[in-house]
Image: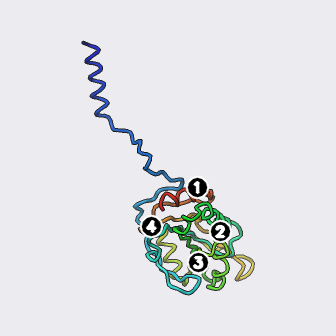
Amino acid sequence: MKKLCIFALMLMLAACSPAKNNDKSVDTFNATDITGAEFAKTLSLTDHTGKKRNLSDFKGKVVALFFGYTHCPDVCPTTMFDLKNAMKLLGDKSNQVQVLFVTVDPQRDTQEIMAQFVPAFDKRFIGLRGSLQETAETLGSFKVFYSKIEGKSKDDYTVDHSAGIYVFDKKGNVRLYMNYGEKSADMASDFGKLI
């Protein structure tokens, strides 16, 4: 009788304990999940063809948004190359992803330079730029750090900047933040989960 009571008590406790989620459909991401963030919501800049663009223009696609500049010696071209490789890994699904490159250096990154630099990685990639004020407002709304580091001459300078990628789902909601150095395979995996 004592064993039966102990067994019944164990069953009751098991029934009261929270169920473990063994649902394989629940996705975990390689990047940092920032779903519900109260920033990174608006963007209105001009693309490398001269067309005004907003984030809402890309609803229906997963958007990867990276801030950089064309004179960047290492981080920016490396990240763009990683994004290019992630698109290759996605195969046909890559048409459901839009990569946007926003310059933090609009003084040197003219429309013409952006038109050469950005599509050189993938013809579907879009470069975005704005005036100094538009750029500052955009970087502020995305909480992107940037600082101009003077060089030996007026045009010889670098720009220190945040090097992560914001990822938006197909509804236009910010979902992920990918740190610099994220592997292309991990990028592709996360993009695929949002597709």
Rendered location of residue 128, percent (x, y): 56, 79
Separation of residues labelled 3 and 1 (CA atoms): 23 Å
Question: Which residue in the structure is indicated by mark 1?
Answer: 186
Question: Mark 2 or 3, which is nearer the eye?
Answer: 3
SS for dot 2? helix
Separation of residues labelled 2 and 3 (CA atoms): 13 Å
Rendered location of residue 40, percent (x, y): 46, 69
Question: Mark 3 or 4, which is nearer the eye?
Answer: 4
Residue found 49% across the figure and 81% down from its top:
53
Separation of residues labelled 3 and 4 (CA atoms): 20 Å
Q: Of 33 and 143, which appears nearest the observer?
A: 33
Q: Earlier in the sequence, mark 1 or mark 4?
A: 4
Characterize the local packing of mark 4: few (<14), some (14-19) or many (20 or more) Cα atoms within 10 angstroms: some
> Which numbered disc covers residue 170?
4
Question: Which residue in the structure is indicated by mark 2?
Answer: 76
Characterize the local packing of mark 1: few (<14), some (14-19) or many (20 or more) Cα atoms within 10 angstroms: some
